Amino acid sequence: MAGILNMKLKSCRRFTRESGGAVAAEMAIVAGFLAILIAQVLDFGWMAYSSVQVRTAAQAAAAEAASICQTQADLPATVNCEANQSIDLQAKMEEAANRVSIGDSATRRVVIAEPSEGYFCHDASANNALVEVGDLNNPPADCSAYGSAEAPGNYIYTTATYNFSPMFPGLSVASVIGNPITADGWMRLD
């Protein structure tokens, strides 16, 4: 009985000293970890790039409204520009927004919300942040209540939305946190 037990112990020791295939097993573990890490980096990079493009698209949409509605007769743009020029302002803004590199296909487009417009002043007590100061029909004469002598500016603004599609859906964290990407675009009209 002792002989059989000794033989089994020797066999177990020989098995634990064997190292054939250990490198392959270690490489499989490390390669899997690296693949997941690379997928994370690529998707976060793609999400950051898409975010910048959505901000650019929102700004392009607002700039398009400013270029279309240039005359004083067209202001306020959300009321008069469409009527004077027989155009769909939101459609023109969305067309401009989709000229960015992420909005160039029929299935992946930047969507522009209905544009808003108002009169704003820079608030000197709040790091010159824009503050809405009246409706489109009744703008105040100046911005003295906010520490500025300038006239209120007529701004048009909109929100751009893009449904982010990660390169590695389900594998990266970006596929969970990156949807949808939104950004605001502002432009002074007068």
Image (cartoon, rainbow, N blue to C red):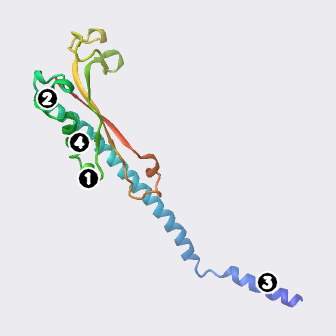
Q: Position of residue 151 (x, y in %)?
A: 20, 14
Give the residue type at disc 4. Ala
Gap between marks 1 and 4, in whole Å? 13 Å
Q: Earlier in the sequence, mark 4 or mark 2?
A: 2
- Nearer the observer, disc 1 or disc 3? 1
Q: Are marks 3 and 2 in contact (CB under 8 Å)?
A: no
Q: Residue at x 26, y 9 (%)?
A: 144
Gap between marks 2 and 1, in whole Å? 27 Å
Gap between marks 1 and 3, in whole Å? 69 Å
Residue at mark 4: 97
- Nearer the observer, disc 2 or disc 1? 1
Q: Position of residue 99 (x, y in %)?
A: 20, 46
Gap between marks 3 and 4, in whole Å? 74 Å
Neighbor class of circle 4 (other Cα within 10 Å; few <14, some 14-19, many 20+) is many
| Left or right placement of residue 36 versus residue 25 in this view | left
Residue at mark 2: 69
Neighbor class of circle 2 (other Cα within 10 Å; few <14, some 14-19, many 20+) is many
Reply above or below: 185 against 52: above
Residue at mark 1: 106
Give the residue type at disc 2. Cys
Q: Quadrant of residue 139?
A: top left
Q: Earlier in the sequence, mark 1 or mark 3?
A: 3
